[in-house]
Amino acid sequence: MADSKTYENEDIIIHWNPDVCIHAGECVRNAKAVFRPKERPWVQMENGSSQEIMNAIDKCPSGALKYEKK
Ligand code: SF4
C-alpha cells in the first residue's frame, strides 16, 4: 500500500491516499483550480481558499482525501 501524500497551507494539512482514490472526480468538480489531476503536483492549494478546499474534501466519496486543521 502506498503512503498517503500530504499537502499543506497555513490552515490545514491534506492527506491523499492514492490506493483509496476511485477517481470519481468530486474533488475536481468542487474545486477545479485546486485539484488538477493532469498536473504535478495535482493538488495546488494556493489556488483556493481553505474553506473551499475543506468543502470539496467533505464530498470525496472514497475517503481518499482527508484534511486536518492546524
Ligand atoms: S473526490 Fe476523492 S475519490 Fe474522487 S478523485 Fe477526488 S480524491 Fe479521488
Image (cartoon, grey):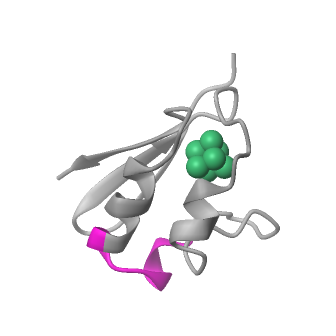
Residue lying furthest left: 70
> Which residues, given as a range, are shown in magenta?
44-51
Residue found at x 46% / y 72%: 45
Report x, y in % for residue 48: 42, 80
Answer with the quarter of the image where residue 44 lies. bottom right
Residue found at x 82% / y 67%: 38
Q: Relative to 46, say whether 61 is above or below.
A: above
Q: How many marks?
A: 0
Q: Relative to 21, say whether 46 is above or below.
A: below
Q: Is residue 64 left or right of residue 10?
A: right
Q: Relative to 13, say whether 52 is above or below.
A: below
The N terminus, quarter of image: top right
Report x, y in % for residue 66: 40, 41
Report x, y in % for residue 26: 59, 56
Observer-nearest residue: 66 or 11? 66
Q: Relative to 4, say whether 47 is above or below.
A: below
Residue 50 within the segment the image draws in magenta:
yes
Q: Is residue 6 left or right of residue 67?
A: right
Residue found at x 52% / y 72%: 31
Residue found at x 75% / y 62%: 37
Report x, y in % for residue 11: 22, 65
